[in-house]
Image (cartoon, grey):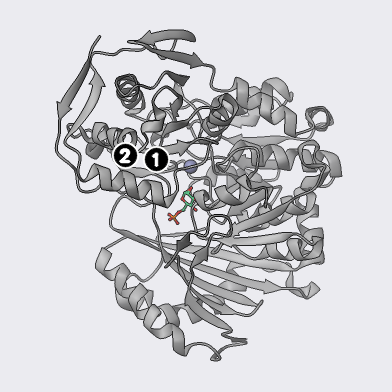
């Protein structure tokens, strides 16, 4: 086997978004496309030479092909060892854990998260660094710059690793170790949660329904919930990962996980409902007849986490992304914890976690996790809820009601306008940006604008700055309207409008979310002017 240098030309579009490089499969199938991007990483990170890399993906179409290429290029670029999940499978949090646990210099996670898969679907790659977190903006900018100047890449040709055979193989001088994708992750979960208590909870007849949405969490859920915790096999639905995710859209929310939602609102609903996305980092939580919004789930976990074995020493602090509702802030205030507000994108939590400032963090986009990994973690969130139910003996409904009574309730919704022409989406952002300065002090309905600005973030750990991270119109504690452009779409531009309303009076805690937010949505209509400037009468998705 010999290393070959192949001449190539740059592609202009290899700029990472909110979570890695995400494109249509056909884009990745262009000659040298993936190779260029990978070589750009090896070129800006020569320190990967002689080190270990972790590789795995969510199992979507093109996963195996991409992993073979990445292994062949790792060997050609002097990497000494690749640890790869069996069948090319590793959930995003399991990858993060393996990187941390093995002391690897980094890893490639092949995923386009919840975006549809298959030949016509999306593909993607995230580069994670030592410690298991996603490459930060400065690094992804350097990779992008390298990709625009690339002239050649290094590869060993005709590499064909048997991804299904556990154990060690070699590619040239590099070792490839194929590992079970669940083992180490399951061990980590056992160290954080009280498996005995959860087992007892199931023995008492309590029930869980977990929807793996034909994506990567199937094997994890099967092992943990069924084999280790004793839940009946029927507790895990859509458990087999498929290359096209069964044709579905594995995004755990009220729209795309509707069958689970319907089940949870039916007469014979189980006690807890959970779902995760394509690569296993998102989660949705439901109780019998109740949906727990991601922001609420984060706040409720913040209030209960110190009852669970891995968190008995208490929380160091907490963080949420800016558009995530401020329910977490109320718990932090009540418990004297620091609470950080970061831009959208899990990578912004990494420094806070690494420096020990926070233990728990989460986002409105159905992401929750703790300092056990450097990614969000869907199965972890469901286990945390199971453990909270088991130790408190309460139902999800009871936990939510007690929480709202103590801290008040944040009604919350996100309106997505998908696949807009880029110019239209920009017109909305520009118009609102121009209008912001004059808004402060103005009254809309019951609310007065206390702050109107473009959100920027100064990282307290490394001093780096991120500007233009979303426009916000804040009505004190009472409400917020936020608008930003998504950084994860692969077609046109996606505009997100976030609505948040806070109520504390006992007779205002049981409203339907849509009713609670109707007045705020009307205000947003006139302020943000989405229908006027884009011609769209209604959002594509409301979650
Ligand atoms: C991914 C990231 C999250 C982010 C979400 C939405 O899941 O991991 O951190 O919140 O995408 O990002 P977007 O830019 O599309 O709103
Ligand atoms: Zn994901």
Front position in the image: 122 or 7: 7
Residue found at x 19% / y 35%: 30
Residue found at x 57% / y 43%: 376
Front position in the image: 516 or 12: 12
Q: Residues within 10 Å of mark 2 (few under 14, many from 20)?
A: some
Label 1: element kind: loop
In the displayed structure image, the side of residue 229 where residue 59 appears, left or right: left
Label 2: element kind: loop
Question: Residue 98, labelled with which disc?
Answer: none
Image x and y of residue 13, in percent: 24, 48
Residue 33 visible: yes
Image x and y of residue 493, in percent: 32, 60
Quadrant position of the N terminus in the picture = top left
For label 1, the residue is: 112
Q: Which one is in front in this view, the residue at disc 1 or the one at disc 2?
A: 1
- 19 in relation to 219, above or below: below
Residue 293 visible: no
Image x and y of residue 42, in percent: 33, 33
Rendering quarter of residue 411? bottom right
Rendering quarter of residue 34? top left
In the displayed structure image, the side of residue 95 where residue 228 appears, left or right: right
Circles 1, 2 touching at the beta carbon (< 8 Å): yes
For label 2, the residue is: 121
Image x and y of residue 159, in percent: 28, 13
Tally of numbered tags: 2
- 409 in relation to 279, above or below: below
Residue found at x 85% / y 40%: 391
């Amino acid at each position: 086997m010999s290393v070959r240098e192949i001449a190539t030309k740059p592609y202009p579009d290899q700029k990472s978004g909110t979570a890695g490089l995400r494109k249509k499969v056909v884009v990745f199938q262009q000659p040298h496309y993936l190779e260029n991007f990978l070589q750009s990483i090896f070129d800006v990170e020569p320190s990967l030479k002689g080190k270990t890399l972790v590789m795995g993906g969510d199992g979507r179409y093109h996963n195996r092909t991409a992993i073979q290429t990445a292994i062949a290029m790792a060997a050609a670029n002097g990497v000494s060892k690749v640890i790869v999940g069996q069948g090319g499978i590793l959930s995003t949090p399991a990858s993060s854990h393996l990187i941390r646990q093995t002391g690897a210099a980094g890893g490639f996670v092949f995923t386009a998260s919840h975006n549809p898969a298959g030949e016509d679907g999306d593909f993607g790659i995230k580069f994670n660094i030592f410690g298991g977190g996603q490459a930060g903006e400065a690094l992804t900018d350097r990779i992008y710059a390298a990709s625009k100047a690339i002239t050649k890449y290094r590869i060993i040709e005709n590499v064909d690793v048997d991804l299904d055979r556990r154990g060690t193989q070699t590619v040239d001088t590099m070792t490839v170790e194929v590992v079970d994708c669940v083992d180490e992750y399951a061990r980590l979960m056992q160290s954080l949660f009280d498996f005995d208590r959860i087992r007892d909870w199931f023995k008492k007849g309590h029930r869980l329904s977990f929807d793996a949405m034909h994506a990567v969490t199937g094997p994890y859920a099967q092992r943990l919930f069924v084999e280790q915790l004793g839940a009946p096999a029927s507790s895990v639905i859509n458990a087999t990962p498929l290359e096209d995710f069964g044709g579905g859209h594995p995004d755990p929310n009220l729209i795309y996980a509707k069958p689970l939602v319907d089940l949870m609102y039916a007469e014979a609903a189980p006690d807890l409902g959970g779902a995760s996305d394509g690569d296993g980092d998102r989660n949705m939580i439901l109780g019998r007849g109740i949906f727990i919004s991601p922001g609420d789930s984060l706040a409720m976990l913040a209030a209960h986490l110190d009852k669970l074995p891995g968190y008995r020493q208490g929380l160091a602090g907490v963080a949420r992304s800016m558009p995530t509702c401020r329910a977490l802030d109320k718990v932090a205030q009540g418990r004297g914890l620091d609470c950080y507000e970061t831009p959208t994108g899990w990578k912004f939590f990494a420094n806070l976690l690494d420096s020990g400032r926070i233990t728990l963090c989460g986002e409105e986009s159905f992401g929750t996790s703790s300092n056990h990994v450097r990614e969000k973690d869907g199965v972890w969130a469901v286990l945390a809820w199971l453990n909270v139910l088991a130790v408190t003996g309460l139902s999800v409904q009871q936990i939510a009601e007690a929480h709202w009574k103590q801290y008040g309730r944040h009604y919350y919704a996100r309106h997505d306008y998908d696949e807009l022409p880029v110019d239209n989406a920009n017109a909305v952002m520009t118009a609102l940006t121009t209008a912001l300065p004059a808004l402060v002090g103005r009254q809309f309905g019951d609310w007065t604008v206390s702050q109107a600005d473009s959100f920027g973030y100064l990282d307290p750990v490394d001093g780096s700055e991120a500007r233009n991270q979303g426009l916000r119109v804040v009505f004190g504690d009472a409400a917020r309207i936020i608008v930003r452009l998504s950084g994860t779409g692969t077609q046109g531009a996606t505009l997100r409008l976030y609505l948040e309303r806070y109520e504390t009076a006992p007779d205002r805690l049981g409203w339907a979310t849509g009713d609670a937010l109707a007045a705020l949505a009307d205000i947003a209509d006139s302020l943000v002017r989405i229908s006027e400037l884009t011609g769209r009468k209604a959002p594509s998705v409301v979650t």
